[in-house]
Image (cartoon, rainbow, N blue to C red):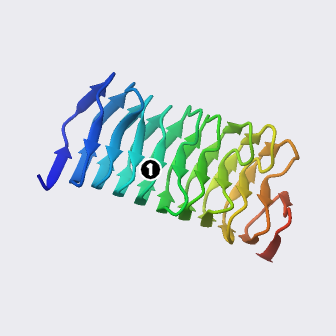
Amino acid sequence: YSSFSISEEISFLSSEVVNFFSLSTSASNSIFENNSSDAIINTGNIDLVDNTDFIGNNLSNSGKIGRITNAEFNNSQIANNGNIDEISKTTFENNSVESIFNNAGKTINLVLGSTFKNNTSSAIKTPGTINEIADSIFTDNISNSDGAAVYIDSTGAVNKISDSLFINNISKTGKGGAVYNQGGELEIADTDFINNKSLETIIIYLDVVVCVLSGNFLQISRGLGKILDFS
């Protein structure tokens, strides 16, 4: 088969796992609930995941995904070991591991219009590259490590964060209540930071990197990095 589609309102419960191998596929109007680990394992090509809920199980990608939109990940993770063009209008909540984990050398082009709330680890952790996070909300995420909302590893990069809101995110034992950046140059534009906290009372932590900022920032720790422009 060259293509496969789930387009009806279907629930996958308990132990059912959908494996997409070298297929052009889509999944919509479905519920994946309480499967043992990964509800979808993709090693091929998924064009679209739309209006689909993941509850207590993960989406694992080592191929290519075009777009994930209007989805919900409740106690569920996107583990990306491939490439994803867009994650949009998607809610991530109640996750005890990273809501999105983007592995080293892998790329997510755009996270758009999504909400990350009530997670107890970094909402996004990226040893790989995320080109832009835009028009998204990070609220009430609490982590026992650095970067309660966004953690950028030394091998990773988030090129730009724009038009987003970080509110009430807490790093209980580390740095960067909102953003912790060990990676490459980061541009932050038109983004509000409200009541984010960490052990060291740092909202944005930069480690040996350059940051371009525009907007209103109450508190920034530069670490060993520097601000390239602040307007």
Residue 24 drawn above or below residue 174: below
Looking at the image, which residue sits at the far left?
1
| Residue at position x 73%, y 55% in the image | 180
| Residue at image mark 1 | 89
Q: Which of 64 and 32 is in front in this view?
A: 64
- Rendering quarter of residue 97: top right
Residue 8 locus on image (x, y percent) = 18, 37
Question: Going 70% across and 56% down the picture, which residue do you hit?
Answer: 192
Whether residue 112 is visible to the viewer of this picture, yes or no, is: yes
Q: Is residue 138 above or below residue 134?
A: above
Does 146 sit above or below residue 219?
above
Looking at the rendered structure, the kind of residue marked 1 is Lys
Binning the other alpha carbons within 10 Å of mark 1 as few (below 14), some (14 to 19) or many (20 upward) gives some
Q: Position of residue 52 (x, y in %)?
A: 34, 39
Give SS at disc 1.
loop
The residue at the point 15 percent across, 53 percent down is: 3
Q: As rendered, which of 110 and 168 lies closer to the eye?
A: 110
At which x and y percent is residue 68?
38, 51
Q: Quadrant of residue 33?
A: top left
Residue 142 on image: x %, y %: 70, 37
**Going by the image, does 78 lie left or right of 19?**
right
User: Looking at the image, which residue sits at the far bottom?
Assistant: 229
Name the residue furthest top.
Answer: 14
The quadrant the C terminus occupies is bottom right
Q: Which of 80 and 123 is in front in this view?
A: 80
> Taking the image as drawn, is residue 51 in sight?
no
